[in-house]
């Protein structure tokens, strides 16, 4: 790992900042205390809500941690297409006895207000999703001592991250659960993402900044593989969804290993942007018709997802999961980090022994 990343987290394990209530302070604290890098997700929260979680996390650990921000999205959605999708979802609203959300509930996710908080009350690490922040933003965070990372899904995006002045890039493979962090939402490229090992190799040869590998990683042996491919660390999301401290709904945790949910797909059904989830009824019925309209569709379906959770109906939830979901382990997060570290050491030993023959 780079010296800065080593200082931040002794082990090359980063807990992905999963928005929607999964990456709670208790989870981030447990990961950081175990020598990884815990993350809070500021996405879908107010600036004050983010600040309160940061305060809570600081009360749980003195170790470094990170906060993730969503970049504001351009107004590219077709209102007519969103309206058609809303009409299609009317039956869901009736079924769950709720109303659809307002698709015009905001596009910037409180970005400027959150940045102001993070500049006034600096945290060790800040990462960005859905685009590249302005150089002025990255420079201002660096001046207050914050290490910055930005997600990229292609080598071209990684070069843009480096040009903007980020300290490191997160190479997100198509295997990853949740939203793909593409810089531009281009429907024509849906499903054409690059696998993680190929992506890490391409990004490593394209930029000079450290690379953090993300996408479907569930075991220490996989961490060893991405490190061998040139990554400085691995970011794991789905692996931590099932952790005891995770804020994920119990239905979501159980679904990861439930044989009923045999596979994942990239879908726009829940948010209007490509995101990998376990295939359930909602995804099957609405995924083919969901428009490229983020965050409009996210706002539209939010009450439906909330009502499904209240009803205990996993078939209406966004069950975000990477391709390795069946390997999820229900452990305390700190213990999971310890297990991953032991598996990583074993894999490295096996590789060394093989090379010595």
Image: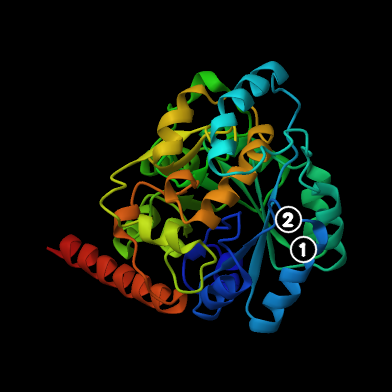
Relative depth, front residue between 108 and 137: 108
In the image, residue 268 above or below residue 129? above
The furthest residue to the left: 357
User: Is there CB contact under 8 Å for labels 2 and 1?
Assistant: yes
Q: Residue at x 86, y 53 (%)?
A: 113
Give percent across and percent down for residue 79: 72, 20
Q: Which mark is residue 351?
A: none
Relative depth, front residue between 219 and 199: 219
Q: Which mark is residue 45?
A: 2
Q: Residue at x 69, y 16 (%)?
A: 80
Query: Is 77 left, or right, of 345 in this rendering?
Result: right
Mark 2 neighbour class, 10 Å CA radius: few under 14, some 14 to 19, many 20 or more: some
Relative depth, front residue between 47 and 152: 47
What separation in Å lies between label 2 and label 1 (alpha carbons)?
Answer: 6 Å
In the image, residue 234 above or below residue 316? below
Residue 219 seen in the current view: yes
Give percent across and percent down for residue 82: 66, 23
Which element carries disc 1, helix, strand or loop?
helix
Give percent across and percent down for residue 185: 61, 28
Give percent across and percent down for residue 86: 63, 27
Which element carries disc 2, helix, strand or loop?
loop
Query: Is 81 left, or right, of 15 in this rendering?
Result: right
In the image, residue 259 above or below residue 288? below
Query: Is 7 left, or right, of 224 in this rendering?
Result: right
Mark 1 neighbour class, 10 Å CA radius: few under 14, some 14 to 19, many 20 or more: few
Quadrant containing the C terminus in the rendered view? bottom left
Circle 1 residue: 49
């Amino acid at each position: 790992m780079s010296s800065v990343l080593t200082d931040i987290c002794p082990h090359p394990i980063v807990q992905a900042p999963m928005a929607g209530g999964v990456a709670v302070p208790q989870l981030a604290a447990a990961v950081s205390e175990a020598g990884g890098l815990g993350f809070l997700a500021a996405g879908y929260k107010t600036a004050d809500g983010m600040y309160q979680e940061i305060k809570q996390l600081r009360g749980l650990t003195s170790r470094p941690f990170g906060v993730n921000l969503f970049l504001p999205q351009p107004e590219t959605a077709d209102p007519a297409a969103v309206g058609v999708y809303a009409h299609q979802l009317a039956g869901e609203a009736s079924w769950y006895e709720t109303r659809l959300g307002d698709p015009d509930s905001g596009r910037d996710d409180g970005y400027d207000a959150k940045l102001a908080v993070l500049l006034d009350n600096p945290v060790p690490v800040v990462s960005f999703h859905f685009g590249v922040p302005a150089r002025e933003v990255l420079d201002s965070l660096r001046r207050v001592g914050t290490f910055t990372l930005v997600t990229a899904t292609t080598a071209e995006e990684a070069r843009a991250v480096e040009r903007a002045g980020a300290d490191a890039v997160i190479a997100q493979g198509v295997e990853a659960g949740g939203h793909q962090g593409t810089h531009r939402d281009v429907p024509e490229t849906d499903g054409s993402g690059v696998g993680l090992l190929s992506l890490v190799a391409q990004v490593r040869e394209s930029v000079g900044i450290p690379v953090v590998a993300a996408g479907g990683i569930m075991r220490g042996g996989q961490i060893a593989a991405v490190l061998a491919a040139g990554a400085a660390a691995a970011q794991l999301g789905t692996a931590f969804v099932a952790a005891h401290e995770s804020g994920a709904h119990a239905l979501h945790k159980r679904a990861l290993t439930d044989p009923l949910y045999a596979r994942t797909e990239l879908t726009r059904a829940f948010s209007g942007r490509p995101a990998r989830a376990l295939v359930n009824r909602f995804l099957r019925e609405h995924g083919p018709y969901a428009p490229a309209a983020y965050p409009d569709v996210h706002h539209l379906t939010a009450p439906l997802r909330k009502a499904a959770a209240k009803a205990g109906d996993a078939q209406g939830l966004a069950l975000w999961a990477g391709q390795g979901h069946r390997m999820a382990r229900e452990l305390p997060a700190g213990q999971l980090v310890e297990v991953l570290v032991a598996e990583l050491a074993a894999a490295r030993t096996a590789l060394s022994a093989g090379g010595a023959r």
